[in-house]
């Protein structure tokens, strides 16, 4: 009697019908993929979506034992956007949560496919994996069962596009140590897209200390939490050597820093009141006695869409002429003017 009871319990828990779930997007053949960093620092490719795009596809439920029925309490698919703070693991903050019921409670006697569509889904934030926080979007299909649900998750990546004007205010700053050093530096813009070029100049107005090295660093600062439990993580993304050797008074050094080669994200400010990601240009001077002098300035990074307004070529030419004053820049300006009038 005891043996029979044990077999019944074992079959109920372990040897009953089970199934595999697969989620397939309708436009999987044509949709672009984007590289995205995972938590362990590796990069994988995921299907790429933008805010407002529809997410549709199929959920395939394949029975492991054909001909044997699978009882369930319903089948559903969810579209979820969530933020997870690593110091508060297990406590997920969902900012998007959509559910579609695919089947009412009942039973499946053969493998089945269910269609789903989430229309014009709001995806307000960019996917992000950082030092202390992760923002992710995923589809989760679930066969609900009394004891153990069967579920499958599929991550997607979301990029947020911005339309900042190409011509925006330049950054001008001074670094000074009384009677020792006076430097002015200027960057052509304060907002840069992720494939942009930082163009600038550094002017040495007074040099009475022996500078042996100068560089510009791009620093990423990730801030998580609020109030007393705020965490800051600074990460130096790039180091750009401006000069190696002593400058003289009246010298002017040009800067051209290409952003495309670095692992950058758009600037993120107070995302869902959980975290921020900001970027800074850090000017570093080192003298012969290894003393370091810093000057830091925040810049805004943004992701550019594929649509380029006609006037942008004109504005870019103005910026180039202003900083480089070359004949080539002047001809670029004339060419842009012709395009606009044409």
Image (spheres, helix red, strand yellow):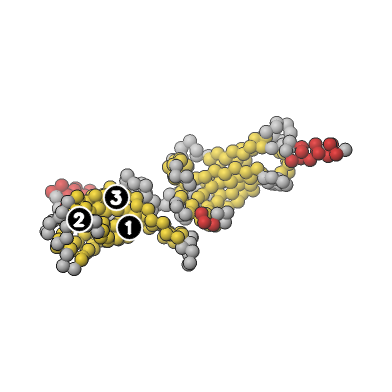
- Tag nearer the camera, 2 or 3: 2
Judge from the rendering whether residue 105 lies leftward or rightward of residue 92; answer left or right: right
Within-10-Å neighbours for mark 2: few <14, some 14–19, many 20+: few
**Label 2: which secondary element:** loop
Residue that numbered label 2 is attached to? 288
The x and y percentages for residue 209 are 16, 60
Whether residue 18 is visible here, answered yes or no, is yes
Residue that numbered label 3 is attached to? 239
Label 2 and label 3: CA atoms lie apart by 20 Å
Q: Earlier in the sequence, mark 1 or mark 3?
A: 3
In the displayed orientation, state which residue is furthest to the top: 66
**Frontmost residue, 333 versus 168:** 168
The x and y percentages for residue 179 are 16, 67
In the displayed orientation, state which residue is furthest to the right: 1
Label 1 and label 3: CA atoms lie apart by 12 Å
Residue that numbered label 1 is attached to? 280
- At x 38% / y 56%, what residue is drawn? 234
The x and y percentages for residue 22 are 59, 38
Whether residue 92 is visible here, answered yes or no, is no
- At x 14% / y 62%, what residue is drawn? 208
The x and y percentages for residue 232 are 42, 59
**Label 3: which secondary element:** strand
- At x 20% / y 66%, what residue is drawn? 177
Label 2 and label 1: CA atoms lie apart by 26 Å
């Amino acid at each position: 009697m005891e043996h029979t009871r044990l077999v019944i319990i074992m079959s109920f828990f372990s040897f009953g019908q089970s199934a595999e779930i697969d989620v397939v997007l309708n436009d999987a053949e044509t949709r672009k993929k984007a590289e995205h960093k995972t938590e362990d620092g590796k990069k994988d490719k995921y299907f790429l979506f933008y805010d407002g795009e529809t997410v549709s596809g199929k959920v395939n439920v394949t029975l492991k034992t054909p001909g044997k029925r699978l009882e369930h309490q319903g089948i559903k698919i969810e579209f979820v956007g969530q933020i997870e703070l690593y110091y508060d693991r297990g406590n997920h903050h969902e900012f998007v949560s959509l559910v579609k019921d695919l089947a009412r409670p009942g039973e499946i006697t053969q493998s089945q496919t269910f269609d789903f569509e989430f229309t014009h889904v709001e995806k307000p934030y960019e996917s992000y994996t950082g030092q202390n926080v992760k923002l992710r979007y995923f589809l989760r299909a679930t066969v609900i069962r009394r004891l153990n649900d069967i579920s499958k998750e599929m991550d997607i990546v979301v990029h947020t596009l911005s339309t900042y004007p190409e011509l925006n205010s330049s950054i001008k700053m001074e670094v000074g140590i009384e009677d020792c050093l006076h430097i002015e530096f200027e960057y052509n813009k304060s907002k840069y897209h992720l494939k942009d070029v930082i163009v600038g100049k550094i002017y040495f107005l007074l040099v009475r200390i022996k500078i042996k090295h100068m560089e510009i660093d791009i620093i990423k600062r990730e801030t998580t939490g609020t109030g007393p439990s705020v965490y800051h993580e600074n990460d130096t993304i790039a180091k750009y050597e401006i000069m190696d050797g002593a400058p003289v008074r009246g010298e002017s050094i040009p800067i051209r820093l290409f952003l495309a080669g670095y692992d950058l994200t758009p600037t993120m400010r107070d995302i869902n009141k959980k975290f921020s990601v900001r970027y800074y240009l850090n000017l570093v001077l080192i003298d012969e006695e290894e003393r370091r002098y810093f000057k830091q300035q925040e810049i805004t990074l943004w992701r550019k869409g594929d649509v380029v307004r006609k006037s942008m070529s004109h504005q870019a030419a103005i910026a180039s002429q202003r900083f480089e004053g070359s004949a080539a820049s002047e001809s670029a300006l004339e060419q842009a003017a012709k395009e606009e009038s044409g």
